Image (cartoon, rainbow, N blue to C red):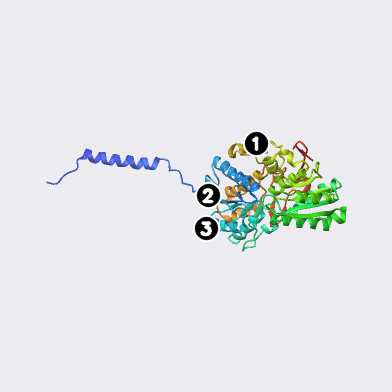
Amino acid sequence: MKNKISLPFLTIILITSYLLVVSAISAPAAAVERKPILVGMSWDITGWNAPSGRPEGDGAILAVEDWNERGGVFGGHKVEYLFRDDESDPIKAAGIAREFIRKRAIAVVGGASSTGAIATVGILAPAKIPFVHNAGSLKALQRGPDGKVYSFSSVGYTPQWPAVTFHHMQKNSYKRIALIYTKAAFGIAVAEEVRKAVVEKWGPKYGMEIVSDIGVEMKAVDLSSEVAKIKKSKPDAIWCGLYAGNQAAFAVGLRTTNWLPPPPFYVIDAWVHEVMAARGRKLMWGAVGWGGVDSRRKDVQELNARFKKRFGYESIGAMLLGYDAMNVILHAIDKVGTDPLKIRDIIEKEDFPSFRGRQGTLTYYNAENGYNALKPEDHVLFRVNEKGEEIIE
């Protein structure tokens, strides 16, 4: 006798199946998994430029954390970073850039020194990977195989700086200029631009001349003899193309030679702030800083307070460079996604919000329009007085 399925049992099966189907249809769709986006970070945190590289790297990390806390980029993708220390070594910097390419980083931030940035962009540009760095040497500008620029500086480039500083010197009737610089890519490049500016414009037009011209090794920690030589040349002002470590040694040399108060010495704002944060504000008495940052601004002070709470030390200038550089990349990714070519296009075409700029903009190279920099009158210039206070000019 064949087994028969009872009608009630069949009814239960049909009802159960119906409910399962309805439940599956009406249940909310599972959240779409959004893969994290990888960005490379290459900073010199243990090499000779560590006084700048470390806070720049930490500033970039803070920017990533801020974006992730707000929900990520491009519709909710979290940002991951691959952090590497290039140790201020161009060979290591190039190797790190190759690693970023192998691991499919869609963009790279770093290059606290021109020495590292030049090596990095030499690998990334041929691979058409956008690179935002904090190096000033024009050699860090290299084009990809498509003829487009893939490297962008958040500090501007060395030809821009003489225009700012000499404009201020001329306004104050300084004519005898001493030049001291670090014998590394950035220092050499900026020294060439200073000499060129004096020969081509500021000498013939305003009577300026270079009365002392000294290069120093990047690992030098005692510049007393160099300061003594500069003192003998009796300059009205001193142009310092020095990395932060050398700049601190220079400031100590002023005290060792009892050259106080010194003539005004011109230093990019990031280095002024880093030396004051690490060695004491009074050490930089006599400095004339220039750049896009006004450290009195409320937003800058708030960001610096968050940075100090997060990392346990103070930094203004260098931290902001790293923070801004990473923000440029993440802003572009948030707008166009993960295509490196589209990211590059956005960086080139747009001015980005920044804590640094008085006008709310970064300075970077625009391949189409040339130097997209703040004009001399738009830069913030300040003098450091005997108490270590920054007096805005």
**Tags 2 and 3 touching, CB below 8 Å:** no
Q: CA distance from mark 1 to mark 3?
A: 38 Å
Spot the residue most to the bottom: 145
Residue 81's disc is none
**Which of the two discs, 1 and 2, sits closer to the camera?**
1
Residue 269 position, x and y percent, is: 72, 45
Type of the residue with mark 2: Ile
Q: Residue at x 58, y 55 (%)?
A: 340
Q: CA distance from mark 2 to mark 3?
A: 15 Å
**Tags 1 and 3 touching, CB below 8 Å:** no
Q: Which residue is mark 1?
A: 302
Residue 13 position, x and y percent, is: 26, 41
Residue 218 position, x and y percent, is: 68, 53
Q: Which residue is mark 2?
A: 37
Structural crowding at the residue carrying mark 3, measured as other residues with C-alpha within 10 Å and reported as few (<14), some (14–19) or many (≥20): few
Query: Within the image, what quadrant is residue 339 found in?
Result: bottom right
Going from the N terminus, do you reach mark 2 or mark 3 first? 2
Check the picture and name the quadrant holding the C terminus: top right
Type of the residue with mark 3: Arg
Structural crowding at the residue carrying mark 2, measured as other residues with C-alpha within 10 Å and reported as few (<14), some (14–19) or many (≥20): many
Q: Which residue is mark 3?
A: 102
Relative depth, front residue between 243 and 168: 243
Structural crowding at the residue carrying mark 1, measured as other residues with C-alpha within 10 Å and reported as few (<14), some (14–19) or many (≥20): few
Apparent side of residue 143 relative to residue 392 in the rendered image (left or right): left
